[in-house]
Amino acid sequence: MRSLIFLLLCSSQAFGALYDRGDGLIYDDVLDITWLQDANYAQTSGFGIDGRMTWSQSISWVDNFIYSDHSNWRLPSRGPFCHRWNCNQSEIGNLFYSTLGNTSISAPNIGPFNNIQPSLYWTDTPANNNGVWGFIWSSGYQQTTTNYSHSFIWPVHDGDIGLVSIPLPAGITLFLSGLLSLGVARLRKN
């Protein structure tokens, strides 16, 4: 019985994990992308009354977007062909269904995010001459809509940009000063 309890405690699901990197950045370890914690940062930063924009406005906005000293943000990718419900091949669909464990019939779990709108979010994927793929957060529905309609954007950045790294020269200096301190302490002890 004890072994069974230990096994259950140590087992894990195959879902991805989200890591709060501070400064409004959430890292998704399965997709290897960083999400903004604020899912309607366009509004928060003062774009329009509600943050919605056309697809061409969203492309321009995200192309010029700098957050936490990082540029090169983009809209989430749609991925392979999938539409309607239960599409977890798109980045936002993967977040909704796989990472956060939502279903199309439940009130969505928002995880560590805030300001998520129960409406359509743009992806980076055109559908046809006047259409673009989007994802409706309130229902988990992936669909096309006209590129001139107004929808929300949720920028993502490739990789884990919230990691703090020590530059190599500083790391070497830190290591050598630690060794020197140990050597001095050892000499004083003798």
Image (cartoon, rainbow, N blue to C red):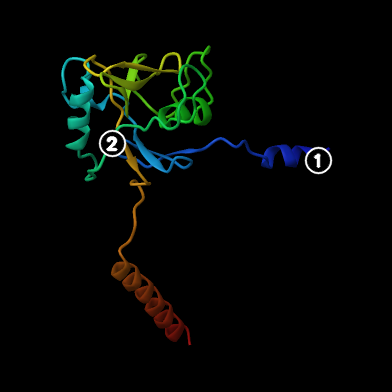
Identify the residue position indicated by label 1 in the image. Answer: 2
- Lateral position of residue 28 relative to residue 155, left or right: right
**Residue in view at x 29 percent, y 70 percent:** 169
Which amino acid is tagged 2? Arg
Residue at image point 30% right, 32% down: 75
Front-most of 9 and 98? 98
Relative to residue 46, is residue 166 depicted above or below? below
Q: Residues within 10 Å of mark 1 (few under 14, many from 20)?
A: few
- Of the image marks 2 and 1, the number of the one nearer the N terminus: 1
Q: Is residue 115 visible?
A: no
Viewer-closest of 92 and 161: 92
Closer to the camera in the image, 4 or 174: 4
Which of the labelled discs sits on residue 74, or is there none? 2
The residue that appears at 39% across and 29% down in the rendered structure is 78
The front one of 140 and 130 is 130
Q: Position of residue 47 (x, y in %)?
A: 16, 23
Q: Is residue 11 left or right of residue 146?
A: right
Disc 2 from disc 1: Cα separation: 49 Å
Q: Position of residue 142 (x, y in %)?
A: 42, 19
Please give the label number shown on residue 18: none
Q: Secondary structure at mark 2?
A: loop
